[in-house]
Image (cartoon, grey):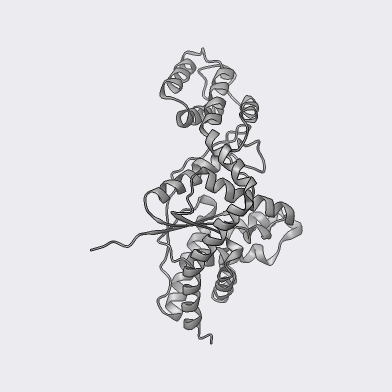
């Protein structure tokens, strides 16, 4: 008996360059899923980016850059469907249908809406409020088995499952209830404030496209312990990164030196910076090529949209029929 290939779907906000935390916490795992033979849909959520303050020219540049980084890092357009959310009109059509079966009370309970409303007090818009129903539409259109999401989106995925169940009960079996594909919890800490995770907004993140010089400069500023042998979240973070990017011998050398109190943190930072720069050397070269060849990237997105639309249009037609729309 032939087993159905499982479908994975994930979207990323169009917020420009990816840092080491984004890469290890999500993108590297997406690449592994793709290479394991899952049917993968990966899209840039450019419509979601409209819910918080943005500049059109910047949004266009950031969207293109995210796509280039996806591909340069190893997402393969031959194996995965890579597309932009705004290229598939079915996303917003299904979102409207879901809006009409979503109780306001459920949207009011969304913690991310509350947090963003506090942060962007001058821009508390309807899109920010209904963001979760558009996210539900993003997911349900492709009827995935699993959706890799981080902690901050778990509540939205639960709402998606709830809406799928509600729609099925009211209009007949249509959507599977997608499960959360639990990403390995690789939380890369901020170099300046290791109690928090690495962030683009309140941090000096190490971008995977940074030059070797920039990586070295940023790591020099990383917080460490005052002396060797003392517990330090900053040092733990650097060791964790060295374990991933460095050699086994290098990791052991610095761990032993830390225990003995003979460690030179400047040497640890320099070694780590060198290893991270080396790891992403091919990526930087590939990204540079893609940033120059916009026509090639446009072709990838056009083909991705074509493939995504085959599934999305079929699902929407089924939804319209069940809703009684002529």
Residue 79 point in image, percent of width and height: 43, 54
Q: Residue at x 43, y 44 (%)?
A: 184
Residue 260 point in image, percent of width and height: 47, 13
Q: Residue at x 42, y 20 (%)?
A: 249
Q: Does residue 246 appear in the picture of this structure?
A: yes
Residue 73 point in image, percent of width and height: 52, 43
Instruction: Give the residue furthest to the left.
Output: 1
What is the quadrant of the N terminus in the image? Answer: bottom left
| Residue 143 placement, left or right of 99 | left
Q: Does residue 13 appear in the picture of this structure?
A: no
Q: Nearer the viewer, residue 22 or 149?
A: 22
Q: Residue at x 57, y 26 (%)?
A: 273
Q: Nearer the viewer, residue 54 or 126?
A: 54
Residue 52 lies, with reference to residue 265, above or below; the image says: below
Count of marks overlaid on the render: 0
| The image quarter in which residue 227 lies | top right
Residue 215 lies, with reference to residue 306, above or below; the image says: above
| Residue 130 placement, left or right of 57 | left
Residue 51 point in image, percent of width and height: 67, 60
Q: Residue at x 56, y 30 (%)?
A: 277
Residue 9 lies, with reference to residue 164, above or below; the image says: above
């Amino acid at each position: 008996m032939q087993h159905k290939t499982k479908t994975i779907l994930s979207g990323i906000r169009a917020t420009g360059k990816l840092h080491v935390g984004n890469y290890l916490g999500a993108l590297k795992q997406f690449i592994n899923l793709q290479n394991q033979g899952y049917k993968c849909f990966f899209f840039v959520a450019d419509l979601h980016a409209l819910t918080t303050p943005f500049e059109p020219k910047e949004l266009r540049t950031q969207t293109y850059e995210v796509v280039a980084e996806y591909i340069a890092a190893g997402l393969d357009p031959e194996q995965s469907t890579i597309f932009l959310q705004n290229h598939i009109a079915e996303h917003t059509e299904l979102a409207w249908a879901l809006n009409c079966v979503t109780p306001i009370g459920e949207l009011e309970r969304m913690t991310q809406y509350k947090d963003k409303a506090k942060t962007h007090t001058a821009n508390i818009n309807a899109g920010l409020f209904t963001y979760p129903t558009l996210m539900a539409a993003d997911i349900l259109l492709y009827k995935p088995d699993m959706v890799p999401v981080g902690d901050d989106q778990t509540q939205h995925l639960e709402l998606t499952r709830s809406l799928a169940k509600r729609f099925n009960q009211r209009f007949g079996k249509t959507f599977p209830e997608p499960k959360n594909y639990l990403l390995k919890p690789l939380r890369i800490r901020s170099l300046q404030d290791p109690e928090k995770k690495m962030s683009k907004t309140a941090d000096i993140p190490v971008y995977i496209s940074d030059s070797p010089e920039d990586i070295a400069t940023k790591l020099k500023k990383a917080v460490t312990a005052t002396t060797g042998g003392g517990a330090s979240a900053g040092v733990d973070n650097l060791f964790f990164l060295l374990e991933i990017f460095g050699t086994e011998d290098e990791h052991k050398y610095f761990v032993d030196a830390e225990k003995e109190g003979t460690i030179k943190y400047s040497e640890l930072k320099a070694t780590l910076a060198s290893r991270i720069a080396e790891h992403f050397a091919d990526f930087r070269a590939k990204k540079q090529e893609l940033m120059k060849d916009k026509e090639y990237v446009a072709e990838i997105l056009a083909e991705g949209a074509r493939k995504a639309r085959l599934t999305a249009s079929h699902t929407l037609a089924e939804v319209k029929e069940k809703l009684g729309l002529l």
